[in-house]
Image (spheres, rainbow, N blue to C red):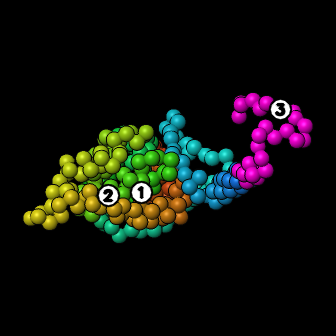
Amino acid sequence: MENESHKHIHDENCNHGFGPATKIAGSVLVASVIIALSIFYNTKLLLNNSGGLANLQETQTLDGSAVPSQPSNPGQPSQPSGPVTVAERKDAPVLGKSDAKVTIVEFSDFQCPFCKQFIDQTFNQIKKAYIDTGKVKLIFRHFPLPFHVNAQVSAVAAECANQQGKFWQYHDLLFKNGTSDGTGLASADLKKYADSLGLNNGTLGFGKNKFNQCLDANATLSIVQGDQKDGQAAGTSGTPTFYINGKQLVGAQPFSAFQQAIDEALK
C-alpha cells in the first residue's frame, strides 16, 4: 500500500474525547481485521496447495506450441505422460459414428479464447478429414474456469439445449457470439440463442419455455460439475484439453498436431 501513516504523539491520558467504551470497540474491530486476514491467507494457501480451482488455467499457443499458463505454486497437477482413461458420461454430446476407431474427448470452456481459436481454426478441418469420414468421434465435456464470469452459466445452458437434442447447434452459437470477457454469454443472450433454435416453443402446448426454466433453475449444474471432476481426475488443468484415445493434447494446437495424434491412433 502507498498510503502514508501519520504519527501523533500524546501523553498517556490523551483520549481526544474517546471514552473506555470506544476504546473497547476499537480493539474488537482491530482483532476482527486480524482474524479475517488470517482466514484469507490460510484459505488461499490451502487452495494453492490442493491442486484445486486455483490451479485451473487457460492454455495458449506460441509458435504453434501449447503453453499452459502455470501458477507459481508447487501444487500444479502433473500432466499424464501416457494414455489415461477418462470417465464416461452416457449423455455427453457426441459428434461422429459411435463405432469410430478413435475417440477424442474435449474439455472446453465457452468463454475461453483459446477454445474459440480451436473452433475457428482447427475444428472444421478435423470434422471434414476424420469425423465425417467415420474415423473419429468427438465427445464434448465441460470445464468452465472459475475466473470466467459467464463460463459456468453457458455450460449449464448448453446442457439444457442438449436435453432437447440441440447441443451442437447451441454450441456453435455460443462460440460464434461469445467473447473472452463474457460479452454475449449472459443469461439474456443465452435465452435469445435458445429462442432462435425453438427451444422454448414447446409442442402442442407442452414444453413452453422449457429451456428458460431449465436455465433459471440451474437444472444441469450437477452435470457440468461432474464433467469438471472427471476432467481433473484425468489430469486436465486448463482449456482446451483433448484426449485422443486417452493420449492428452493440450491447447489450441494446429491441425497438424491433431493429424499426427489421430493418425497414430488409427494405426
Give the class, few, some or many, for how many residues have Cα within 10 Å of label 2's Cα (few <14, many ≥20): many
- Decide: is 44 above or below 2: below
Residue 2 among those drawn in magenta: yes
Mark 3 vs 2, N-terminal side:
3
Per the image, label 2 sits on a secondary structure element best described as helix
**Seen in the image, is 225 located left or right of residue 167?**
right
Work out how far the residue at label 1 is from the one at label 2, CA to CA, in angstroms: 16 Å
Amino acid found under the numbered disc labelled 3: His
Quarter of the view holding residue 267: bottom left
- Number of the front mark, 1 or 3: 3
- Decide: is 229 above or below 171: below
Quarter of the view holding residue 76: bottom right
**Seen in the image, is 91 located left or right of residue 208?**
right
**What residue sits 79% from the left and 37% below the top?**
16
Instruction: Pick the residue in front: 67 or 42.
Output: 42
Give the class, few, some or many, for how many residues have Cα within 10 Å of label 1's Cα (few <14, many ≥20): many
Residue 114 image offset from top left, x and y in percent: 44, 42
Amino acid found under the numbered disc labelled 1: His
- Residue 215's label in the rendered image is 2
Residue 168 among those drawn in magenta: no
Residue 15 image offset from top left, x and y in percent: 81, 40
**What residue sits 30% from the left and 47% below the top?**
188
Is residue 197 among the parts visible in the rendering?
Answer: yes
Work out how far the residue at label 1 is from the one at label 3, CA to CA, in angstroms: 58 Å
Per the image, label 3 sits on a secondary structure element best described as loop
The segment highlighted magenta reads 1-29
Q: Which residue is the site of mark 3?
A: 8
**Seen in the image, is 108 located left or right of residue 207?**
right
Residue 63 image offset from top left, x and y in percent: 51, 34
Q: Which residue is the site of mark 1?
A: 142
Per the image, label 1 sits on a secondary structure element best described as strand
